[in-house]
Image (cartoon, helix red, strand yellow):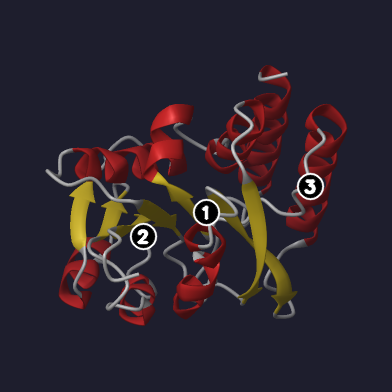
Amino acid sequence: MDKLRIDVVIPAYNEAQSVGLVVQDIPKYLVRHIVVADNNSTDDTARVAREAGAVVVAENHQGYGAACLKGLDFLRKQELKPDIVVFLDADYSDHPEEMTDLIQPILDGKAELVIGSRSTREKGAMMPQQIFGNWLATSLMRVLYGAKFTDLGPFRAITWRALEEIRMQDRDFGWTVEMQVKVLKKKIPYAEHPVKYRRRKGVSKITGTIRGTFMAGYKIILTILRHV
């Protein structure tokens, strides 16, 4: 395990009250770089992340996928590329200390993508519209692609080889499902691992608004259908 290069990418928009906690809880012995992609925040997200020990890169174009892509740009410029990239959110809803278990299917050679399936959820951690949207998206993937996914969870690990093969492009709400659909299309082995999920700190910029919820749901469904 100590010979593997494992890097972490955390997209963040106005998460000053939580991003430091996320960075602090990541098992430091496990990772090389912790990259926080500051997505045009107007608060102290960047400062807090740096003080917690992360590398901060700036992405002024608003969008979850855009921030993730900026983080990958940083990794792509490294002389030694990572073996595994872990993604998680900056709102402290995920449990970063579970990263060791999340990557295990990759270490065992059983998968190149592992989705953290939010099987143990704190009450109120996911809004009803999130739960429904998650069910709808995974059901569509099952019908159209024969997928066995149960979640679009943001806490995920993927090999660098697979990431380069699927050539991620989405710059906003379709990022997570694009990754899963492309892995299905390329027949890249995948797995899910149960993770805990808690109420986020602060207000969600997506599910916290009607417009955000609608736009996210629309983009997720569109992304699934586009790749059929």
**Mark sitting on residue 125:** none
Q: Which residue is mark 2?
A: 14
Percent of width and height locating residue 140: 82, 35
**Mark sitting on residue 148:** 3
Q: Tell me how far mark 3 sits from mark 1, CA to CA.
A: 29 Å
The answer to whether 133 appears left or right of 60 in the picture is right
Percent of width and height locating residue 146: 82, 35
- Determine contact: label 3, label 2, CB under 8 Å: no
What is the three-letter code of the residue carrying label 2?
Asn
**Quarter of the rendering occupied by the N terminus:** bottom left
Q: Secondary structure at mark 1?
A: loop
**Quarter of the rendering occupied by the C terminus:** top right
Q: Nearer the viewer, residue 54 or 123?
A: 54
Percent of width and height locating residue 168: 45, 30
**Mark sitting on residue 205:** 1
Vertical relation: 209 (above or below) 186: below
Q: Secondary structure at mark 2?
A: loop
Percent of width and height locating residue 118: 68, 67
Quadrant housing residue 59: top left
